[in-house]
Amino acid sequence: MRYEHMIQGTFISRPNRFIAHVAIRREAGGEEETVVCHVKNTGRCRELLLPGAGVILQFHPEAAALGRKTEYSLIGVLKERNGELLLINMDSQAPNQVAAEWLHAMEQAPTLPVNGYDGEKFLPALRLANIRREVTYGQSRFDLAFDMVFDMAFDMAFDMAFDMAFDMAFDMAFDSACAQLPDTPLISASAPARIPSSAPAFQSCTKPAFMEVKGVTLEENGIAMFPDAPTERGIKHILELAEAVKAGYEAYILFVIQMKGIREFTPNQKTHPQFGDALRLAHEAGVHILAYDCIVTADTLEIDRAVPVSLSTF
């Protein structure tokens, strides 16, 4: 995602969760002035918003016309770590946006794990479809929902091979499944399936999936943690995802780490141990726990690389 009208400033204070005082120069060499900014993150962020810290603001030229109380939003902050400055995106609305962009980017070549399949060996989902945001399930509203489209022969083969020695039986079961679907082209089970533009349509089946997205701005010595404050709502969503898996859905929790330089993600046991307990319970129930870092610039945010997840209590 991309921002417009960005400007640098120096953090002064945060009177409450919603606003901050920041020193800026509207023009290079201009007079320094203090402006009131909307903080787009109601988390504590105490380790980030320190007096004198460099910050990135977004200027809203249409603020008056839109009835905004402030002309600026605080988007990013520079954190000193090991003698270097680490740029962290603090916008709590950004993770959902970049997660949706990330899913759309992998529509034709998904790389998401799927329950019952060994994702290290092959990728069963041919594509993602019907990606949408803010979808209600049970008593929760999940950030993203989508359909995972599978080749039906692949799905049949898995069912047939499940109770057999999988590695030895799968190729034979796959051929057998394809033979029962004469209109389905035979494809190799040893590599991710890709449909040539000239090939006839595959007989396919779909599996619905939900994804809950959490933005992460807290890090210590290269370890990212969530949450930075207790979140009962977060626990509710996690447990609802576990119930969705029991009902036959695929479910994901995606931790969008809004910075680079991260070597591991772990739940914040010190701040909210119950959140970590819920995360481990969901993992055992079949919910996929994913963490990705981001490429962060003053005016862009993009999901980049997977980060190892540790659910240990120690």
Image: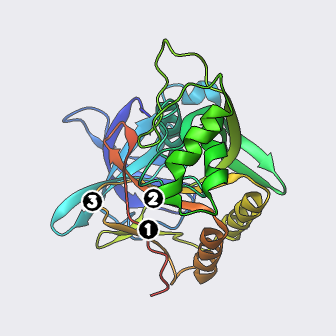
Tell me which label, 1 or 2, sits earlier in the chain: 2
Residue at left 61%, top 50%?
Answer: 158
Residue at left 79%, top 47%?
Answer: 136
Tell me which label, 3 or 1, sits earlier in the chain: 3
Q: Nearer the viewer, residue 56 or 171?
A: 171
Residue furthest to the left in view is: 83
Res 214 seen here: no
Q: Secondary structure at mark 3?
A: loop
Q: Nearer the viewer, residue 33 or 103?
A: 103
Query: Circles 1 and 2: CB distance less than 8 Å?
Result: yes
Q: Is residue 150 left or right of residue 103?
A: right
- Residue 6 coordinates in the image, percent (x, y): 36, 35
The residue that label 3 is drawn on is 261
- Residue 102 coordinates in the image, percent (x, y): 48, 38
Q: For the residues carrying marks 3 and 1, which lies nearer the camera in this image?
A: 1
Residue at left 30%, top 69%?
Answer: 222
Residue at left 47%, top 41%?
Answer: 189
- Residue 291 coordinates in the image, percent (x, y): 45, 58
Q: Residues within 10 Å of mark 2 (few under 14, many from 20)?
A: many
Q: Amino acid at mark 2?
A: Ala
- Residue 89 coordinates in the image, percent (x, y): 40, 50
Q: Nearer the viewer, residue 288 or 96?
A: 288
Q: Identify the image quadrant of the C terminus.
A: bottom left
The residue that label 2 is drawn on is 291
Q: Tell me the tag on residue 309.
A: 1
What's the CA distance linking mark 3 and mark 1? 15 Å
Q: Is residue 276 left or right of residue 234?
A: left
